[in-house]
Amino acid sequence: MSFYSWLLGRPFVYDHLRPLVVGGVDAGPLYRKLGATERDVVLDVGCGTGDALRHLRAFAHYYGVDPDATAVAHARGRFARREGVSFRVGTVDAAMLAETAPSLAVLSGVLHHLPDDQALSLLSLLRTSKELSRLVTMDIVYLDGQLLSNALAWLDRGAFCRRREAYEALARRSGWFVRESAVIRSHPTKGRALYLIMTLEPQGTDRERRSC
Ligand SMILES: C[S@@+](CC[C@H](N)C(=O)[O-])C[C@H]1O[C@@H](n2cnc3c(N)ncnc32)[C@H](O)[C@@H]1O
């Protein structure tokens, strides 16, 4: 890992300095698309410092998992006392999916850190989870004519920023139906960066068939 990537991954830099550079970050729209209720088990893959818990108000259980032990320690310090919340250091696997049985899942800022083969493996693994009815993703994105946002995306430590169609193609190839794909500002009034939010549902469900 380069010093630049290491630095951008420090919890203080990630939580406080990165928002200043992009003009503010508000992930509220992502979590509104998730639509969690008190009956849902939420799996936050690549939870980082636990930003999801600033937005999620209702869930039966929240599981955050991330390979970065420093970020997970920071998340635990902020949120582990909240009821129904647990964190793990590592990556998600079939055993964890079977044990936790999530009904909703989040990949916030994760896909642009993964090359295509790893992104496909992760999305395909999540697709095998029988109870999972919705997966939401949010990532930096390259867009025609958006020079400032594209420059900020290029400076991001994630090395696999893609165009919108490429993210959508990864989702479809992994068995997900793209219910919605929307470009939002990193912050509704001040954001200089543009992010892609995808709302994914299992292909072949009744809801997908009704919308076709
Ligand atoms: C940009 S941060 C996003 C953190 C958090 N989700 C948020 O929205 O603030 C990306 C996170 O993905 C994690 N990550 C990278 N590869 C991963 C993988 N294969 N599985 C799960 N998480 C991964 C990194 O450790 C990092 O914490």
Image (cartoon, rainbow, N blue to C red):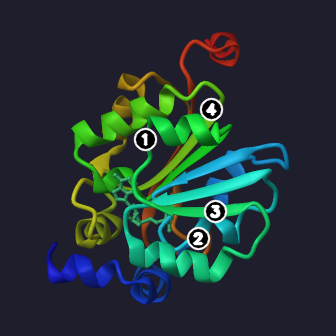
Q: What type is the residue that disc 1 sits on?
A: Asp
Instruction: Report the residue at 69% width, 18% height from top.
Output: 207
User: Which of pointers 2 and 3 indicates the residue nearer the eye?
Assistant: 3
Q: Name the residue under label 3.
A: 86
Numbered disc 4: secondary structure: loop
Q: Name the residue under label 1.
A: 93
Give the left or right position of residue 148, taking residue 199 as reference: left
Q: Toward the viewer: 41 or 96? A: 96
- The reply to whether discs 1 and 3 touch (Cβ–Cβ < 8 Å) is no
Q: How far apart are marks 1 and 3 (CA)?
A: 16 Å
**Residue that carries the numbered disc 2 in the rendered image:** 51
Q: Could you say where residue 103 lies in the image, as x and y percent from the top left?
A: 68, 37
Instruction: Decide if residue 28 is on the left or right side of residue 38.
Output: left
Return the residue found at the far left: 2
Query: How many angstroms separate mark 3 from mark 4 (CA)?
Result: 18 Å
Quarter for ligand 1? bottom left
Query: Which dot, 2 or 1, sits closer to the camera?
Result: 1
Q: Which mark, residue 141?
A: none
Q: Could you tell me residue 169's position as x and y percent?
A: 35, 30
Within 10 angstroms of label 4, few (less than 14), some, or many (20 or more) residues?
many
What element does badge 3 sit on?
A: strand
The amino acid at mark 4 is Leu
Mark 2 beta carbon near ligand 1 (under 8 Å): yes
> Which mark sits nearer the N-terminus, 4 or 2?
2
| 111, 23: nearer the viewer | 111
Q: What whole-number distance in Å separates the C-alpha atoms at marks 2 and 3? A: 14 Å
Q: Of tags 4 and 2, which is closer to the observer?
A: 4
| Three-letter code for the amino acid on which mark 3 is drawn | Ser
Give the answer, above or below, for where 36 lies relative to 187.
above
Per the image, label 1 sits on a secondary structure element best described as loop
Camera sees residue 142: no
**Label located before the other in sequence (2 or 3):** 2
